[in-house]
Image (cartoon, helix red, strand yellow):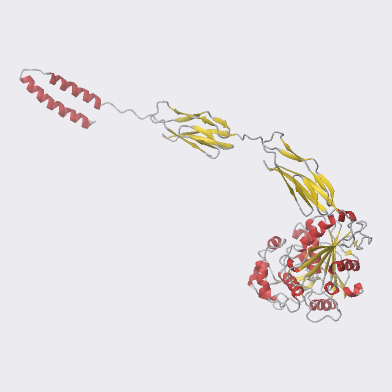
Amino acid sequence: MQEHVSAIKNFVRRSATTAAATVVSGTVSVAVVLVVVFAVSALSTSCRKTPPPVRVESVAVSPAEMTLLPGESDQATARVEPADADDKSVVWSSDDSSVATVSSTGLVKAVAPGATAIRVTANDGGKTTRLNVTVRDPRVRVTSVALDKSTSIMTVGDSDRLAATVEPEDATDKTVSWSSSDERIATVSEGLVTAHAPGRVTITATTADGGKTAECTVAVYSADPPVDGKVTVLQQATEGAGIDIVLMGDGFSDKTISDGTYAAAMKDAAEHFFSEEPYLSHRRMFNVWAVDVISGGSVFDGSTALGCTLASGGVTTIEGNDSRCMEYAYKAVGDFDRMDNTVIVVMVNSPTWHGTCYMYYPAGYPNVAPGNDCGEGLSVSYFAAGRNTNELRQLLVHESNGHGFPKLGDEYWYDNDSSPTNEEIATLIRYKAWGWAKNIDLTSDPAEVKWAAFLADPRYAREGLGVYEGGYYNGRGVWRSTEESIMRYNRGGFNAPSREAIYYRIHRLAFGAEWRYDYETFVRWDLARAGTSVSAAGAAADTAAGTAARSVSRTNGDSGGFGSVEGSEGSGDVGAEDEAGMGVLSPMPHTPPVVVPRSWRDAFGK
């Protein structure tokens, strides 16, 4: 401002000098007047203040909401306040251009069904607002589908048509696809169901629009009357000589065989048998058969086909007619020499907790050939179907996979203060010469126990291995390798010594006496398959971080478990301390396997 005033003063002085000269000459010219007017005007202009800019205070959009169909357009209008804002320009944008787009002038175009927001933002100050855009689906969507029947009974070879009704009636896409839960039992095409084999199957109709479903349960019966003793091959070994497993059931009627219930139970049993390592990885080395056994009822008082009886009063023993089981098994195996190491697995059709394994001396006893150290001998494992799948699996795996195949010993006991008698010690030593009970030992010396190699191997440090007192029905004088295992609490998987024993027996039976065991080969296989069993996750959780590996210890306060050897029965229930200490457990078997002191040939009369 001061500079302007100074400039004007200088201009006035120069102009005044000129004007003075003019006046002196006696003439007052117009120039004088103009000079004065200009000076006054310039001074007035330079003293006036510049007004501040008008800023945007808000922005609004109209309409506030739009509903369109795909392909439609509508114009949105932005209004900036105040009306005399210097910069009223705005920018348009879409939150989801896959639903709707917007042009630089606010033209909104619907793309696909959905919802999004169109935003308008003032360039001056960034004030923003939104309009909500809904793009409607032009189709009438499916809300449900129903079948004309929810159950169907069929005979092998028959066909039955199912009709599907899609709602609402004016739905745009009423397409339905069909599927069968087991095409071995029944197939379906455009709603036409064709029965192929006895069993139960679920037929499902699914809408293309929305994936709505409806189901029909189909029971397929055999067209022929059931045949007692019919053999079904469930799998054949593809490697090695083949290890023979024969499945059968007791207390199953002819109807359960005709409607496929029996076949499904046998298949379930086979899957449970191969749910644990090392069985899971070596399944290809096994022959598995199922034999149909027809009973007149399911009252287990000795009158069923296999003569099973279930103990009462808290005792979980099952007694059966082993010779009948051997007769049925021979229908499948068909070779007396192969029967010497056959595992007979018997599911008893009872929703209870019972199980007992009968283990026979090796063939040729008492002249057992030296070197037969892989758990020689036929076995018959009886177990109840239990109240649920978990109980069934636990009973089967303990009796058949634990006792029946490798002849493992139980890892729990009845009396905390009991010790094995001299006779029991001598018997256990004889069993060990046959490769039985490799998971327990009579010494507490970590350098001498059967699993000493694992204790010295740092690769097994996380398994909680040690030398723990208590097992084989005695609280003292017998040692095991882990606190938890299938052979103690029916959970937690097989421990390392047990896995080794099972692995050893599988390979000896598959490849014969010329096969040679190698510790490193086993360890590489074993560690590579950690976590593959059904119980593996539980085993990892049950192995406490604070467990001291390679220690000699004893757990006090435990009770329960299997009890005795040479056919005697044990008794007793799960102790309160066990239930409190272990949380929610399935009932524990508390009668021992029965060791039959003769070979199966002697028992069978062959």
Q: Quadrant of residue 347?
A: bottom right
Q: Is residue 113 left or right of residue 522?
A: left
- Is 380 or 263 nearer to us in this picture? 263
Q: Quadrant of the C terminus?
A: bottom right
Q: Quadrant of residue 559?
A: bottom right
The N terminus - image quarter: top left
Residue farthest toward the left in the current orientation of the protein? 25
Q: Is residue 435 visible?
A: yes
Q: What residue do we see at 77% from left, 61% from top?
A: 272
Q: Residue at x 79, y 53 (%)?
A: 185
Front residue of 495 and 10:
495
Quadrant housing residue 356: bottom right
Residue 460 at x, y percent in the picture:
66, 70
Report whether residue 559 is seen: no
Furthest-top residue in this view: 27
424 lies above or below 317: below
Q: Residue 30: horizontal and vertical position, in percent? A: 13, 18
Residue 333 horizontal/vertical position (percent): 84, 69
Which x, y percent locates residue 418?
82, 71
Is residue 47 toward the left or the right of residue 493 in the image? left
Image mark count: 0
Q: Nearer the viewer, residue 50 or 370?
A: 370
Q: Is residue 178 above or below residue 575?
A: above
